[in-house]
Image (cartoon, rainbow, N blue to C red):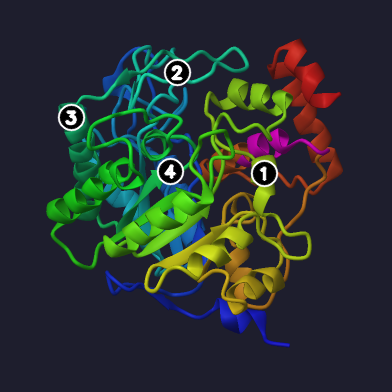
Amino acid sequence: MFNPVELLRQPVTFPFSGRTAKNRFLKSAMSERLATFSPFDPSGRGQPTEELVRLYETWAKGDIGIIVTGNIQIKRDHLEATGRNTIIDRDLPSVYFQEWTEVARAAKSQGSLVIGQLNHPGRQVSINIQPYPEAPSDVEQPSTGGVLFGRPTPLTKDGIKDIVDRFAYAASVLHRAGFDGVQLHAAHGYLLSQFLAKRTNMRTDEYGGSLVNRAQILLEIIAAIRQAVQSPSFIISVKLNSQDSVPEGFCIEESIMVAKLLEIAGVDFIEVSGGAYEQITRSSRDKVTHLFFTGSPELMPGDYKPYTVETREGYFIGYAELLRSHLNLSKVVATGGFQTSQGMADAVSRGTADIIGLARPLTAEPLLVRDILRGEKKKAKGDKFPESPMLRFVASAEQIAEIGNGQDITDFDNAFHVARFIAKMQKEIPAAISEALFS
């Protein structure tokens, strides 16, 4: 039996940037909701706060090899949720350079690499934020749980060029602020994912039709970032769906083909994910409550069933293993569903993944990776929640806020704390949703 700690402690060197992560752990992106936000004045949105700095300073103490920040938006009036997203937009009065420098300093303070995840929601933006969303085609996002979405306007070629330039501009700001790289969010039904899927991309020009055409905007963004940053050591990574799990959505075969294109383009690592907002495996009550609390179509554990293997940990290990067999250089990150150091090490030793991604376990235990690498822990903390993925997501968001505010982290492995949290939620949500969620 191999020592899981020794395997997880190994450094990982990326093939194109030449940068080295100190171990095989990655903190996956989660929307922190710790930036400024004004519902009426877009110029008052997106500024990183000292709570955000404190959050990343805390995660840095956890000895994580790579820290990926949450969902930085590239347009101030096209946001993935009605909340406090961070934003880098050249049209804002400020790009908040000093604040981003502080975030980078905090996240890198213990030797982690820090990667900024960049995103544009496309059609997946609440009508309260943007009644006129932009997307590859005019395929409307179905409304769910009382959250409405406007019919999107197909992007013109000039509009696509503007999007490409905005991604590159945001990357250049992060590079100057001290970030080690960026991650392009091409999963979960957001704009870049919408271009990749035939269901949402019905264009007949060079950005539609064949898979290569549908991937063109993603490849142009990568090239534009390289031109804007002018640093061969700057990491470019992509979060990519294994499949959308909806009719005519992005499929496994297409995902593998896009990953090969990304490797040719010099992408250092691909973080595998799956599902889209329309995914049919999600329960209706969890859709409703998730939208009510966050206004965001982030995916939930129930969405990841296609790649769960009962005898092995990890939601996407089946696909990650398949993908890795088709790549020669780019590293593969498997995120979601890992609970034990043995299960994490198994995924590496079997050749399934090069890097293990963790998200919600690090909101309950920010120092979990450090404790695993010291041999002090072998398993992530559990919880006492009933079988409702939504509750776990809302609880994780609360823990992020607690860390950012320097408060004690609520222990949801304690039945009393769970009961108190559920009672609080029942007071804050409409009766109809409460009945669906807690019955």
Q: Residue at x 36, y 28 (%)?
A: 202
Q: Which mark is residue 52?
A: 4
* SS at mark 3 in the image: helix
Residue type indicated by callout 3? Lys
Residue type indicated by callout 2? Glu
Q: Which mark is residue 140?
A: 2
* SS at mark 4 in the image: helix
How far apart are labels 2 and 3 at the CA level?
A: 20 Å
Q: Earlier in the sequence, mark 2 or mark 4?
A: 4
The residue mark sitting in front, 2 or 1, is 2
Q: Which residues are magenta?
A: 386-396
Q: Residue at x 25, y 57 (%)?
A: 178
Q: Is residue 51 left or right of residue 309?
A: left
Residue furthest to the bottom:
1
Q: Is residue 213 magenta?
A: no
* SS at mark 1 in the image: helix
How far apart are labels 2 and 4 at the CA level?
A: 34 Å
Whole-percent x, y for residue 309 in the image = 73, 59
Q: Residue at x 62, y 63 (%)?
A: 368
Q: Residue at x 79, y 49 (%)?
A: 413
Residue 302, quarter of the rendered image? top right
